[in-house]
Amino acid sequence: MKKLVAFLVVCVLVVGVVTFGSLARAEEPLKITFVTPLVAHPVWDVARAGFEDGARDFNFIGQYVGPQGIDPAEMVNQIEIALVSGVDGIITMPIAPEAMRPAFKKCEDAGVPVVFVGAEDDESTALAFIGTNEADLGRQGAKALMELMNGEPIKAHILQSTMDASFAIKARDGYLDALKDYSGGFEMVLNEPCNSDMMIAMEKYQNAFMAHPEINVAIGVCGEAGPAAAKVIKEMGLVGKITIIAIDDVEETMDFVKDGTIAGTMAQNFYKMGYLGGELLVDKIRNGNNPASFSNDSGCIFVTKDNFDTYTEALKK
């Protein structure tokens, strides 16, 4: 009798599956590697969280690797290691396109699809791009800055990760394009790199503010810029004299936004970069589907004390 009941239960289950199509077979999970530009960084940790959630939702084994500091050569090394290991897909940022193009060509030759996040490279083959429209981020930041300055002349220091980082270049140029027609007048006093290093960023600001007391705006297009500028301004007694426009919504930056030391920050949606990157790769590898659009803007929003408590929901929309 027990055998008969067990047989009937199995039949019901099988018939139930067949009703919705053919009997499903469990597929071996894919292997996807995320080669990040910064393996232990609060901004990219958000992308990692999205990537890990994607691994759970879309059934792939995810490996998250990269250098501790900006190092394109090490990113290339990690891409090549992933290829040798038989990875099915790669997510990465072409932070230094010229140096990384040979590795992207190896991916293409091996038939391993690549999704770019955070920056694009028009000369390399990729399945899709997910990230902020860099120039638009700069224009939005510039618009907010002009409203804050209200006709006062702007003499700016612009800090970026490296001088050849494509994201930083495009974001900076977005600022410059929008600010060139500012009614109060605009001058870029200094444009420097900090290699995404907090101590270097603070040193750059200390030297800049001492050598150029006319600087009244600090624009950051790398995550360290905002908190580094805020710390230096507090140490030098310049609070209220220099307006800081930061980038990203890491905890330290947001603390300074909340207390008013940083006027505002351009928050990007890094979670979507990791999550959607995995989803697009799985759909391509499993089903042969190309994304509906190559370029997928993950979005950004200017965060101040006024929208501090509501911006995350607005960003999702």
Image: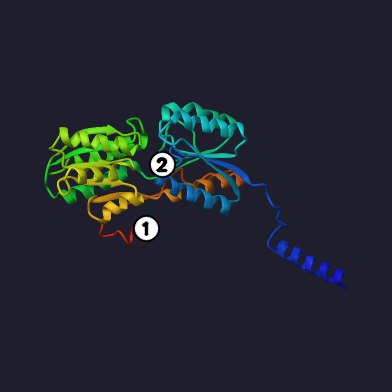
Question: In this figure, which residue is indicated by the disc labeled 1?
Answer: 312
Question: In this figure, which residue is indicated by the disc labeled 2?
Answer: 118
Query: Hey, which residue is sitting farthest right in the picture?
Result: 1
Q: Position of residue 71 (x, y in %)?
A: 43, 31
Q: Position of residue 28 (x, y in %)?
A: 67, 47
Query: Hey, which residue is sitting farthest bottom in the picture?
Result: 1
Amino acid on which disc 2 is placed: Gly
**Quadrant in which the C terminus appears:** bottom left
Rounded to the nearest angstrom, the CA distance separating label 1 from label 2 is 19 Å
Q: Secondary structure at mark 2?
A: loop
Q: Secondary structure at mark 1?
A: helix
Label tally: 2
Inspect this view and state whether residue 173 appears.
no
Give 271 or 209, whichever is nearer the viewer.
209
Give the class, few, some or many, for how many residues have Cα within 10 Å of label 2's Cα (few <14, many ≥20).
many
Q: Position of residue 153 (x, y in %)?
A: 12, 42
Amino acid on which disc 1 is placed: Thr
**Quadrant in which the N terminus appears:** bottom right
Inspect this view and state whether residue 62 appears.
yes
Measuring 57% from the left and 42% from the top, which residue is drawn there?
32
Mark 1 and 2 residues: CB-CB less than 8 Å, in contact? no
**In the rendered image of this protein, does residue 161 appear above or below residue 300?**
above
Which image quadrant for residue 133?
Answer: top left
Give 217 or 176, whichever is nearer the viewer.
217
